[in-house]
Each structure stands twice: as C-alpha cells, then as structure tokens.
Image (cartoon, rainbow, N blue to C red):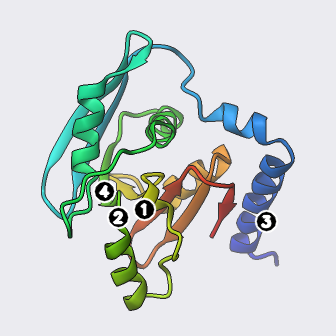
C-alpha cells in the first residue's frame, strides 16, 4: 500500500521542480491578483503586539504601514528594526487570498540581526548561517485556526520561494529566496 506521506512529498517535489524549470511563471503566482488594497494582520508571539496594516493602496506601497510592519517584525531579542522585502509581504497576501481568508499571522520570527542569528545557530542545527531572516526576506509563522500542514501545502504549491515545515514547533518558514521545500 502506498505511503500517503511519501506521495505528498513527491507532489511537493514536482511543484518545486516545475518552478525551477519555469521560474518566471512560478514568481507570477505570488503577485497579487488585483491592484486593490493589500492588508496584513500580524501578532508577534514574543512581544504580544498586534498590527493590522494596509501596506499597499492606490497602486503603491504605503511607507508608514511598511515602517509599522518593519517594527512588529523586528528582532525581538535585540530590538533591531530592518526593512522587510515587499515581495515577502506580497507572498503573505497572496497566500491569504489562496486560503480564502484574511489570516492573522502569528509571527515566531521575522527579521533577525546577524548576532541573533549566530546565537540561534550555536543552539540549533536548524538555523542557516546565511539565513534570509537577516536580510528581511524570511518569516516563521502560523495562522490562527489553520493547521500548519495546510499552510505548508498551500505555500509549497505557490512555488514562490523556500517553505520549511516544523511540525514539532508548530510553524512554517516562508522566504522569497530560491524555490525549495524541507
């Protein structure tokens, strides 16, 4: 009898392979489908802060909303604030559209200073030395009321960057780097 987990992993691999063969097509999927306002809701699990922000309106990114997003996604250990790549925000927005909801993203980790990344890397083999978190191009999240497995599957189907699934820690890593899944 075939193993359903193996079948699912094979499907994800095929999505990733297709995205590598047709990267322009894969990236197009992450562009929002309309020019309407783009809204995101974040809850920072470490600071307890919540932010609801319309970060894109009237055909452009809203600088004040972006600053507020940079702040809530700051390195909670050091307090360092760093710009977050708008492509990552668009990925989160498109993912919400794909899920058919306006999700509340529970943030485990947004931006990480190089010092924080080195500290975490010393504690865990799962932290990359050149982590995209240090460039504002990655986020670790879960969505209130949605199984992380579902979030992982939908993000992987977009083939828009890296998708890491951490079921024991109950979060999904998303980034706008090269397409890969783990």
Q: Which mark is residue 112?
A: 2
Q: Which mark is residue 107?
A: 4
Q: Is residue 78 above or below residue 141?
A: below
Q: Closer to the camera, 65 or 52?
A: 65
Could you tell me which secondary element the residue under label 2 belongs to?
loop
Q: Closer to the camera, 178 or 91?
A: 178
Could you tell me which secondary element the residue under label 4 belongs to?
strand
Most extreme residue toward the right, as rendered? 21
Q: Position of residue 169 (x, y in %)?
A: 38, 75
Image quadrant assignment for residue 104:
top left
Number of residues whose C-alpha sits closer than 10 Å to that of mark 3, classed few (under 14), some (14–19) or many (20 or more): few
* Comes first in the chain, label 4 or label 3: 3
* Comes first in the chain, label 2 or label 4: 4
Label 1 close to label 3 by CB (< 8 Å): no
Q: Closer to the camera, 74 or 80?
A: 80
Quadrant in which the N terminus appears: bottom right
Label 3 close to label 2 by CB (< 8 Å): no
Q: Which mark is residue 134?
A: 1
Quadrant in which the C terminus appears: bottom right
Q: Position of residue 159 (x, y in %)?
A: 68, 48
The residue mark sitting in front, 1 or 4, is 1
The residue mark sitting in front, 1 or 3, is 1
Q: Position of residue 108 (x, y in %)?
A: 31, 63
* Comes first in the chain, label 1 or label 3: 3
């Amino acid at each position: 009898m075939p193993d359903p987990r193996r079948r699912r992993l094979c499907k994800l691999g095929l999505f990733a392979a297709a995205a590598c063969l047709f990267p322009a097509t894969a990236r197009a999927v992450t562009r929002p489908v309309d020019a309407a306002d783009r809204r995101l809701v974040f809850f920072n699990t470490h600071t307890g802060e919540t932010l609801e922000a319309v970060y894109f309106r009237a055909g452009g990114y809203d600088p004040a909303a972006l600053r507020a997003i940079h702040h809530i996604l700051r390195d909670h250990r050091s307090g360092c604030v760093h710009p977050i790549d708008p492509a990552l925000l668009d990925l989160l927005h498109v993912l919400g559209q794909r899920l058919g909801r306006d999700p509340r993203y529970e943030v485990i980790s947004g931006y990480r200073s190089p010092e924080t990344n080195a500290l975490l890397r010393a504690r865990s083999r799962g932290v990359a030395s050149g982590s995209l978190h240090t460039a504002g191009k990655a986020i670790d999240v879960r969505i209130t009321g949605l199984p992380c497995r579902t979030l992982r599957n939908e993000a992987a189907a977009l083939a828009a960057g890296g998708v890491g699934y951490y079921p024991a820690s109950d979060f999904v890593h998303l980034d706008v780097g090269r397409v890969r899944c783990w």
